[in-house]
Image (tube, rainbow, N blue to C red):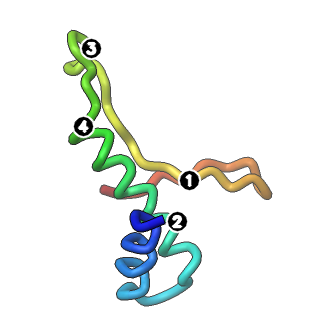
Amino acid sequence: MRDIQLVVQAAREKPGDALGNTIEENVRQVAAMIRREASFGDLAKKVRVVTAIYDPDTGRVGWLKE
């Protein structure tokens, strides 16, 4: 619960849609955590963590700029 509260707090500081900003901020923070904490071993040079959001209404994936 604490993690999502930090995400919501960070998203509140951005202009625009609060829900959209919260979703994007969550995606960015989870990707950063994976990059920081995941152990990919020998695959580390081949793995790339990217950020995207799937929209179930349209079926489209929106890639986020990093």
- Structural crowding at the residue carrying mark 1, measured as other residues with C-alpha within 10 Å and reported as few (<14), some (14–19) or many (≥20): some
- Structural crowding at the residue carrying mark 3, measured as other residues with C-alpha within 10 Å and reported as few (<14), some (14–19) or many (≥20): few
Badge 1 or badge 2: first in the primary sequence: 2
Q: Residue furthest right?
A: 57
Q: Amino acid at mark 3?
A: Leu
| Callout 4–callout 1 Cβ contact below 8 Å | no
Q: Classify 43 as above or below 55.
A: above
Badge 4 or badge 1: first in the primary sequence: 4
The label nearer to you, 4 versus 1, is: 4
Residue 44 image offset from top left, x and y in percent: 22, 20
Q: Amino acid at mark 2?
A: Ile
Residue 23, numbered circle: 2
> Callout 1: helix, strand or loop?
strand
List the residue tagged with mark 1: 53
Mark 1 vs mark 3, CA separation in Å: 25 Å
Residue 45 image offset from top left, x and y in percent: 20, 20
> Callout 3: helix, strand or loop?
helix
Residue 52 image offset from top left, x and y in percent: 49, 50
| Callout 2–callout 4 Cβ contact below 8 Å | no
List the residue tagged with mark 3: 43
Q: Residue furthest front?
A: 1
The label nearer to you, 2 versus 4, is: 4
Residue drawn 26% across the image and 14% down it: 43
Badge 2 or badge 3: first in the primary sequence: 2
Question: Where, by quadrant of the figure, is residue 66 drawn?
Answer: bottom left
Q: Classify 19 as above or below 12.
A: above
Residue 37, numbered circle: 4
> Callout 2: helix, strand or loop?
helix
Q: Amino acid at mark 4?
A: Glu
| Callout 1–callout 2 Cβ contact below 8 Å | yes
Mark 3 vs mark 4, CA separation in Å: 14 Å
| Callout 2–callout 3 Cβ contact below 8 Å | no
